[in-house]
Image (spheres, rainbow, N blue to C red):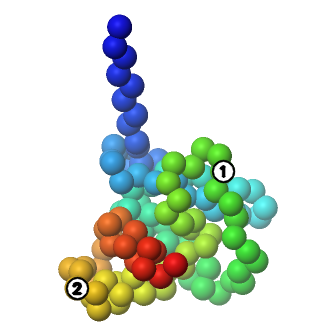
Amino acid sequence: MAQKIVTIYTDDLTGEESTEVATHALAVDGIAYEVDLAPDSYDKLLEAIGPFLKAGRRTGRVKAGAGARKASGSAAASGSGETAKIRAWAKENGYEVNERGRVSADIREAYQNATK
């Protein structure tokens, strides 16, 4: 007997299915959270908390939980300035990237690989 298992990734904010959903970890007042977000929702998260992250102090990197599907960075470890850096890098390296809106997961991954 053959068996087929289908995994459907859903954005926790919008409820929409997406193949680009990634798990992001963040902590507030010592309580750790994980949220599964598509790139658009992740950009919204960064826009909302970006000013607070920029004004705050980094205290270290939090390891992703055992249930994390993809290590695409955590909201606690990324600032709103990171997207600007990625855009600038992408333009310098021949990628087409919009001035506003989300940066594709492919470009984010290429940036991370190039800047390790």
Across and down, in percent, residue 13 comes to 45, 51
**Front-most of residues 78 and 63:** 63
Q: Nearer the viewer, residue 51 or 65?
A: 65
Residue 85 shows in the view: yes
- Report whether 114 appears left or right of 103: right
Contact between marks 2 and 1 (CB within 8 A): the answer is: no
Q: Tell me if residue 53 comes above or below residue 64 in the rendering.
A: below
Image location of residue 12, percent across then percent down:
47, 47
Residue type of the residue flagged with mark 1: Gly
Residue at the right extreme?
Answer: 30
Horizontally, is 85 left or right of 53 in the view?
A: left
Q: Secondary structure at mark 1?
A: loop
What residue does disc 1 label?
65
Q: Secondary structure at mark 2?
A: loop
User: Quick one: label 1, few (<14), some, or many (20+) residues within 10 Å?
Assistant: few
Q: Residue at x 70, y 64 (%)?
A: 62
What amino acid does circle 2 point to? Gly
**Vertical side of 102 occupied by 68: above or below:** above
Mark 2 and mark 1: Cα distance apart in space: 35 Å
Residue 101, x across and y down, in percent:
30, 74
Indicate which label's residue lies in the foreground, 2 or 1.
2
Residue 13 showing in the rendered view: no
Q: At 36% from the left edge and 54% from the top edge, which residue is drawn?
A: 20
Counting from the top left corner in percent of width and height, residue 94 is at: 22, 85
**Is 31 displayed left or right of 24 in the figure?**
right
Q: How many numbered callouts?
A: 2
Q: What residue is rendered at 35% in x and 90% in y?
A: 88
Q: Is residue 54 left or right of 108 when viewed as pictured?
A: right
Residue depicted at x 31% and y 83%: 90
Asked if 69 appears above or below 61 in the picture, the reply is above
Q: Earlier in the sequence, mark 2 or mark 1?
A: 1
Q: Which residue is mark 2?
A: 94
